[in-house]
Amino acid sequence: MNPVPPNLTNNAGAASAGAAVSPSAGAAASPTFSPLYQQIKALITQSLQSGEWKPGELIPSEVELANRFKVSQGTVRKAIDELAAENLVMRRQGKGTFVSTHHEARAHFRFLRLMPDEGVPHYPESKFIEVKRMRAPADVARLLDLKSGDAVIFIKRVQSFDGLPTIVEELWLPGMTFKGLTAERLVEYKGPMYGLFESEFGTRMIRAAEKIRAVCADGANAELLHLPAGTPLLCSERVSFTYGDKPVELRRGLYSTERHHYQNDLN
Amino acid sequence: MNPVPPNLTNNAGAASAGAAVSPSAGAAASPTFSPLYQQIKALITQSLQSGEWKPGELIPSEVELANRFKVSQGTVRKAIDELAAENLVMRRQGKGTFVSTHHEARAHFRFLRLMPDEGVPHYPESKFIEVKRMRAPADVARLLDLKSGDAVIFIKRVQSFDGLPTIVEELWLPGMTFKGLTAERLVEYKGPMYGLFESEFGTRMIRAAEKIRAVCADGANAELLHLPAGTPLLCSERVSFTYGDKPVELRRGLYSTERHHYQNDLN
DNA sequence: AAGTGGTCTAGACCACTTT
DNA sequence: AAGTGGTCTAGACCACTTC
């Protein structure tokens, strides 16, 4: 009955033979067929990725999006439901739907799983040991989907809880994505690095894959952590991804588990 | 218009002043108010917990459940959607909705996060070192929500991948819940222990909380893992829960990360 | 052909927030 | 009072599976 959606294909109720496929003359390859709400979800994700709606901001209401895309509110709702489940947006009754941001206490412990054995969790302080530009070694390039020798930014820092050094980690970031990132900017910035990345470089981390091993502290790292050489440490290698499953950070960390533990919930 | 649901309260559309609260004479305390689909979800969960529908079995169709509870199919659907998201049931288009089970390759790696550095993951072989009844030490009792001195079953085993011993772990199980569990039964059973628990004892693990540290292997454990004493190991403490967030297993494991790593995805 | 879950719509009322 | 997300209903058609 309604004017057919612009570039979308409906796969249910009212419409059926009406819109469907129709590989219009010379058009691009067929959209591989997917539910309407997935197509809507993809469109919304594009707007998030492009920065049309920035972290912390309000996105258009369900009714407005439904009108814009010429679908029912229920279809928009299902798309947003999934985005909320993936932590890309946050719904607040009566107010609207907001783009998620790392500038929130709530988000801080989504990627930091090291918890104090006693007391309430809080965010550590950073001390930067080294910040420099370099060419990506082969292993780093592979994990960041770069070519060996591409420019990367290297960061080494120590993080402390209550003044006790607990984490020493090294980071590699694609030079292209984080052009202009300086040691000064890192030092003066308060709060999680992901907040800085999202605000200053328009790159939001949405997912990470972590591999954990046990190692013994070598002399240099033991000194940084104020521990005897040989102390057992958690060794984490983490690759973080932004929209489109694009890897944009490699982080290798050593965690002291003298007063902390790595917490994980299996659901 | 319809006969008001039996013990449920509707919080939307058609009904409103009709059914609502009405603290009928002398009835139990008010149900604290929650959405209809959450009430349906709770009822379905009860049936799962009580064993009315057993793991692997088909549950009634959405239409049948809607008729039974006198609600719309959409409301049942939303309840089941959440149960599926929590891995309590599995939906299969055209066939129906099934109770989840640990007797599936798919479920095996939900709780076992130790992955080979190279090659495809597969399930380890178990060698049981010790199985006995004992009284719960204070720390075990606390984690399992028992009283100190309550009967527990203690299990110690070594797990090997490709013949290489990789995991040594100790388990404590509430004696009441696992009455009749014997070493013989454990040894002859092939497949994940959680499959045995679910089939023979009607206790299904649905969630677990894990804490991980790094330690150095002591003499005894090093020998069991065929490693030199002092080798760094991952040390995991895991409490598993069944329906109603009731803790029913404590597991303390040491993982060799010579050829494996603990894998975790942060979403 | 019948039954199941999956998608989509249209419309209603509710709880919450802001104006 | 108006707007937003949250809940609920009723009905339609689709894709898949089984009979």
Image (cartoon, coloured by chain):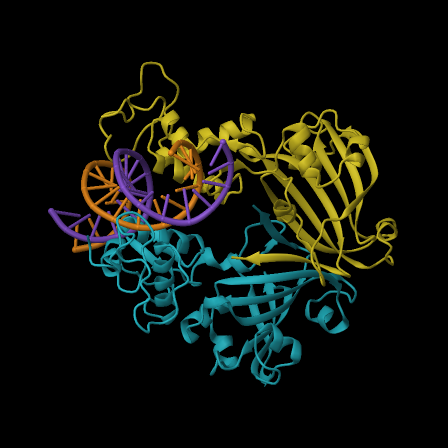
Chain colours: A yellow, B cyan, C purple, D orange
**Image x and y of residue A111, in percent:** 64, 47
Residue at 52 percent across and 81 percent down: it is B175
Place of residue B27 in the rendered image (x, y in percent of width and height, measured from the top left): 33, 72
* Residue B191 in sight in this render: no
Q: Dividing the picture into quarters, in which one does residue B157 lie?
A: bottom right
The answer to which quarter of the image holds residue A142 is top right
Q: Residue B19: x percent and y percent?
A: 27, 58
Q: Is residue A154 left or right of residue C13?
A: right
Which residue is drawn at the image coordinates 56% and 26% (left, top)? A51
Q: Name the image quarter holding the N terminus of chain A.
A: top left
Q: As rendered, which of B32 and B233 lies closer to the eye?
A: B32
Residue visible at 42% across and 37% down? A79
| Residue A21 seen from this side | yes
The number of callouts visible is: 0
Left or right position of A10 against A194: left
Q: Is residue B163 above or below residue A57?
A: below
- Which is more toward the observer, B154 or A110? A110
Left or right, residue A179 beside residue B154: right
Vertical relation: B266 (above or below) A247: below
For residue A171, side relative to residue B178 (left or right): right
Image x and y of residue D13, in percent: 21, 36
Identify which residue is drawn at 61% across, 52% down. B263
